[in-house]
Image: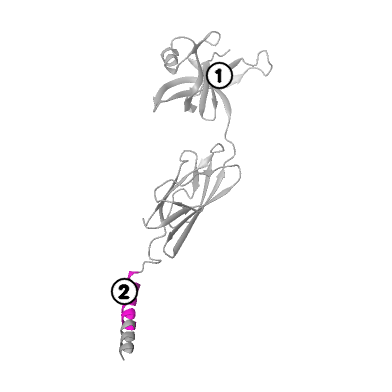
Amino acid sequence: MKRVFALLMTVLMLLSCVPALADGMTYGSGSTRLLSLNHNCPNTGIMLPEQFNPNENTYLLTVADWVSRVIFTPVAEDPMATITVNGQVVRSGQAAPEIGMTDKPQVAYITVSNGSSYNEYTVFLQRRPSEKRTRVSAGYINSITQKNGKWYIDADLVTLSYLSSDYSTGSQSTFTNKVKEVNTYKYSVNPHCDLFYGSEENPTYCYTMYQFLNNYESMGSGMYKFVYIEDEIVAVYPYTPY
């Protein structure tokens, strides 16, 4: 009888613990959504849809052709959730391991798990076709400014018309500047930019941007030619129309 009583008491104790265990379970009850998903290419990256939505699970991110890596920083809605980026665990709010970019399309799988619940975001990655370009423009300098250690030139460009296509007189040109169609631009200046002021026949080389800034209006026609690659000026020298 003692053994039977002891067995009954054991069964009753186990049964009494079942509701308590059930009440304390959190499996599947936590959030598996991301609050945000940022990347390290805000200037060149174009993501579709444009704004991250925790309930939208598929995105396309295209970057400039020269971008070598993409780094995601996911933030989970539930701090207890586990995040992985392409299988590697990442802490919420921390940068994930970089994804090396090539000219081939890639996919980033970002998962959020919480207990038995599981959610996955998919980001298709692609470099855009080359945007590199080399151009030569002419115009008037409106302003030269500096911000965060970077120089910028704002210019009013003119339309050049070259007089011929042969080698001997091919550089001779005239210009027009329609007031109603002012074509202004503001580009950054490469740290190794070649800077000249004065006249096209007798230009003076500047060793620093400060030297150019202090002298570019002192002589010559006031017009300059700008050589730029992509959106960065690599050379500035006087321009005189013929």
Indicate the quadrant containing the C terminus: top left, top right, bottom left or bottom right.
Answer: top right
In the rendered structure, the answer to whether residue 124 lies left or right of residue 94 reads right
Residue 229's tag is none
Question: Where does the image place residue 147, in percent across and percent down from the top left?
Answer: 39, 27
Indicate the quadrant containing the N terminus: top left, top right, bottom left or bottom right.
Answer: bottom left
Residue 175's tag is 1
The one nearer the camera, 202 or 222, is 202
What residue did someone put label 2 on? 20
Question: Where does the image place residue 23, in percent across and percent down from the top left?
Answer: 32, 72
Identified at 61% across, 45% down, the residue is 104
- Disc nearest the viewer among 1 and 2: 2
**Picture layout, residue 98 above or below residue 190:** below
**Picture layout, residue 133 above or below residue 241:** below
- Magenta segment: 11-24
**Picture layout, residue 214 above or below residue 6:** above
Question: Where does the image place residue 128, in percent across and percent down from the top left?
Answer: 57, 41
